[in-house]
């Protein structure tokens, strides 16, 4: 093999991880630190929540949202905070299931929280989960 082609391939392979890392970091350009911290990774279930599980937030979130792989209706959301204070969040009645459901949260003080949710599909199946996050 031509020596200059071989040298070019070695350089390309060596720089590939750097290029990939730069491309991934630029995909979040323009996001605030809180938006980036709250941005969830897609779990194996396909359900993405905001705030994300284990998020560390610099300000309290004003809403909770869940995006499902298929349309669902949010039925309940219970937020448990510091000193095990529990709040059943009022869910607005939805006329039709949606891929992304969002509801307002009460004002949250700094501390550790968990948000337990339940949603129902149009065929009656139920899904639930718990998201843990911290407000600084």
Image (cartoon, helix red, strand yellow):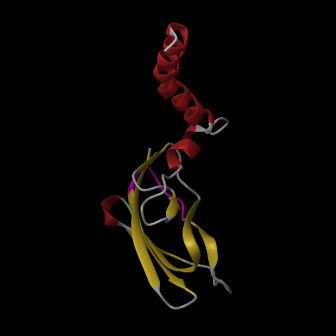
Q: Residue at x 38, y 61 (%)?
A: 81
Q: Is residue 114 left or right of residue 63?
A: left
Q: Is residue 73 above or below residue 52?
A: below
Splitting the image into 4 quarters, where does residue 35 fall? top right
Nearer the observer, 28 or 78? 28
In this view of the protein, which residue sits in the foreground, 15 or 87?
15
Whether 114 is drawn above or below 58: the answer is: below
Is residue 108 covered in magenta?
Answer: yes
Query: What percent of the width, then of the height, locates residue 41?
Result: 48, 52
Residue ID at (52%, 11%): 2
Please state the total of marks drawn on the protein image.
0
Furthest residue toward top:
3
What residue is at 62 percent from the left and 72 percent from the top? 99
38 magenta-colored: no
Q: Image quadrant for the C terminus?
A: top left
Q: Dominant secondary structure of the magenta stretch?
A: loop
Residue 49 in picture, x, y percent from top left: 51, 61
Q: Position of residue 25 (x, y in %)?
A: 56, 33
Would you identify the image quadrant in which residue 44 lies?
bottom left
Residue 36: give x, y in percent of width and height.
55, 42
Q: Which residue is nearer to you in this view: 25 or 58? A: 25
Along the line of sight, the residue nearer the viewer: 5 or 129: 5
Q: Residue furthest front?
A: 1
Q: Which residues are magenta?
A: 106-112
Question: Relative to 96, is 57 above or below?
Answer: above
Q: Is residue 19 left or right of residue 85?
A: right
Residue sitting at the far left = 83
């Amino acid at each position: 093999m031509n020596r200059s082609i071989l040298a070019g391939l070695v350089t390309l392979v060596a720089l590939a991880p750097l290029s990939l890392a730069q491309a991934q970091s630029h995909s979040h350009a323009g996001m605030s630190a809180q938006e980036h911290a709250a941005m969830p990774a897609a779990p194996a279930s396909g359900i993405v929540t905001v705030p994300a599980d284990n998020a560390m937030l610099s300000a309290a979130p004003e809403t909770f949202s869940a995006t499902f792989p298929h349309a669902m209706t949010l039925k309940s959301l219970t937020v448990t905070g510091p000193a095990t204070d529990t709040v059943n969040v009022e869910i607005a009645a939805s006329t039709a299931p949606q891929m992304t459901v969002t509801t307002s949260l009460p004002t949250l003080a700094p501390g550790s929280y968990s948000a337990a949710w339940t949603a129902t599909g149009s065929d009656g199946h139920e899904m639930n989960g718990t998201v843990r996050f911290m407000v600084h």
